[in-house]
Amino acid sequence: MKSMEEMIKAAQQAAETIQKQMTEAQNTLEQIMVEGVSGGGLVKIRCTAKGRVVGVAIDDSLMVPADKQMLEDLVAAAFNDARVRADAASGAEMERIQGSMGLPPGFKLPGMG
């Protein structure tokens, strides 16, 4: 039978391992890139799976002052598309990581919601 001290040490080691894996997962999410598009590809936004925008591309044909409102709407739509794709990529990566740790699907770790 294990002593209380051994069980506490094992629990601490398990917690440290999970924390390390979750930190690695967060770093991985920052490396996964997704692209949101709108206007049939006239506006594109690239972001990480964590949602950090890294680039915006706007087709030259949209650079018309009279069409400013439409351009703004397309940028917002592209951002929202990128956000949906980032959330999907993030969810898939977190499920993969949690599965590798033996956690059940949908298990919410503190701070990783």
Image (cartoon, grey):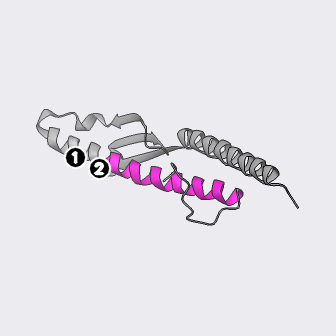
Residue pictured at 73% horizontal, 50% vertical: 14
Query: Could you say where residue 70 lies in the image, as x and y percent from the top left?
Result: 18, 45
- Whether residues under marks 1 and 2 lie with C-beta atoms below 8 angstroms apart, the answer is yes
The answer to whether residue 80 is left or right of residue 31 is left
Type of amino acid at the residue the image marks with label 2: Ala
Residue at the far right in the pictured view: 1
Residue located farthest toward the left when viewing the structure as drawn: 66
User: Badge 2 is on which residue?
Assistant: 77
Q: Quadrant of residue 100?
A: bottom right
Magenta span: chief secondary structure = helix
What span is in magenta? 77-100
Q: Residue furthest front?
A: 4
Query: Percent x, y for residue 37?
Result: 37, 48
Seen in the image, is 76 located left or right of residue 19? left
Residue 87 forms part of the magenta stretch? yes
Q: Which mark is residue 73?
A: 1
Residue 72 in which image quadrant: top left
Q: Is residue 22 above or below residue 88?
A: above
Specify few, some or many for label 2: CA neighbours under 10 Å numbering under 14, 14-19, or 20 or more: some
- The residue positioned 38% from the left and 41% from the top of the image is 45
Quadrant where the N terminus lies?
bottom right
